[in-house]
Image (cartoon, coloured by chain):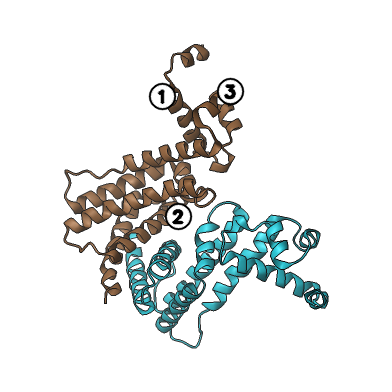
Chain colours: A cyan, B brown
């Protein structure tokens, strides 16, 4: 019966299904354990079919990590109807909530993928740039000058926030409201310090 | 002639020499390019001799990364004769100077080693804990409460500082005085925000 259902999927649907199986695996294991064999077994498909969809293990990893990353970015997309302050707060709250609900996926994205394959690492780094860019948009609306120094500071703060979320939300199950207040205040502190970098 | 000099080395000296060759390689290449073959060729020794000293490639990597890490920790060791504020500033200045002088080694330690082998990653993480602990010592001398929240904040700030050093010192060759002032101020901002985490 599953065979029959599978047969009705379009190539795009089948590909999406295989990626989803990989993302689920990533929620419980580090990326380097996700081999073509493991994915074929989990998805109940043959290895040749998997290679038909992804060419290489690297290609499969890129697809899985990109999808996991995009789910985080989508879950934390800024609400344009909110004022900048409220928007930052809302975005931080939703990232925190995502980390609570997808602890292992977040951990895999932030830690497990860090080096290994540079192409895969770039996928994760892109989301750091997106998050820094979102903060920059809200802060410049608040009158903060968009300088190269601000960009450096925000990108570094995103790494700070990742470490904080792992330690407070995943390791210590801390109250989300408190975590977000802490993140907001450290963000303000970092932004306030950027003029030190200017001549 | 080199043969003759080599012959006079004690086993400990020979091992140290092999590790030093690996650390030098790390200053120009990512860790995963440092194979036993490459190191044997660079050091002008046979593969069997290398395996005699390190057993496995992982063992060799651990020795090389530990030595590179320890050189950073040694270069930034706190001067106990300084008051806490001056000690933090001096330590940050010396880390910044180390990054200037050993850009690729620092980059390899922070970025290239991030995942891959968990044992190797742990070696680098240990130095993050050491640096966070040094800051904690100085801050508690200044009257800051040593809470679990402070420890989380300092560990996350160390990641912030690493990203900042890569962006400002390595990528942009920024004035070290300014970088250190920026690091000091963001550190203060993060410490000031930690009470938000308490009930």
Task: Determine if residue B112 is in view.
Answer: yes
Q: Is A36 left or right of A198, judged from the image as shown?
A: right
Q: Residue B98 is drawn in which quadrant?
A: top left
Pick whichever, A2 or A97, lies toward us.
A2
Residue at image mark 1? B12
SS of the residue under disc 3: loop
Quadrant showing the C terminus of chain A? bottom left
Compared with residue B198, is residue B172 higher up or lower down, i.e. above or below?
A: above
Disc 2 from disc 3: Cα separation: 40 Å
Q: Which of B136 and A84 is in front in this view?
A: B136
Q: In which quarter of the image is residue B191?
A: bottom left
Give how far across and how far down residue B142 sits, in percent.
Answer: 17, 58
Q: Mark 3 points at which residue?
A: B46
The N terminus of chain A sits in image quarter: bottom right
Question: Sequence-wise, which precedes: disc 2 or disc 1?
Answer: 1
Give the label, 2 or 3, closer to the camera: 3
Left or right side of A41 for B115: left
| Residue beneath the point at 35% across and 60% down | B157
């Amino acid at each position: 019966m599953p065979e029959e259902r599978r047969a009705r999927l379009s190539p795009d649907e089948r590909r999406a299904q295989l990626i989803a199986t990989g993302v689920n695996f990533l929620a419980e294991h580090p990326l380097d354990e996700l081999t073509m064999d493991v994915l074929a077994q989990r998805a109940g498909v043959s290895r040749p079919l998997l290679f038909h969809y992804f060419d290489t293990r690297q290609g499969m990893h890129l697809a899985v990590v990109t999808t996991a990353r995009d789910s985080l970015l989508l879950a934390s997309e800024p609400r344009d109807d909110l004022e900048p302050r409220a928007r930052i707060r809302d975005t931080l709250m939703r990232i925190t909530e995502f980390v609570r609900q997808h602890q292992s996926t977040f951990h895999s994205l932030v830690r497990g993928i860090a080096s290994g394959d540079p192409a895969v690492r770039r996928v994760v780094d892109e989301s750091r740039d997106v998050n820094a860019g979102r903060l920059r948009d809200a802060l410049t609306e608040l009158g903060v000058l968009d300088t190269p120094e601000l960009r450096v500071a925000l990108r570094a703060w995103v790494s700070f926030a990742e470490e904080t979320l792992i330690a407070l939300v995943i390791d210590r199950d801390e109250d989300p409201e408190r975590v977000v207040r802490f993140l907001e205040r450290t963000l303000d502190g970092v932004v306030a310090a950027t003029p030190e970098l200017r001549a």
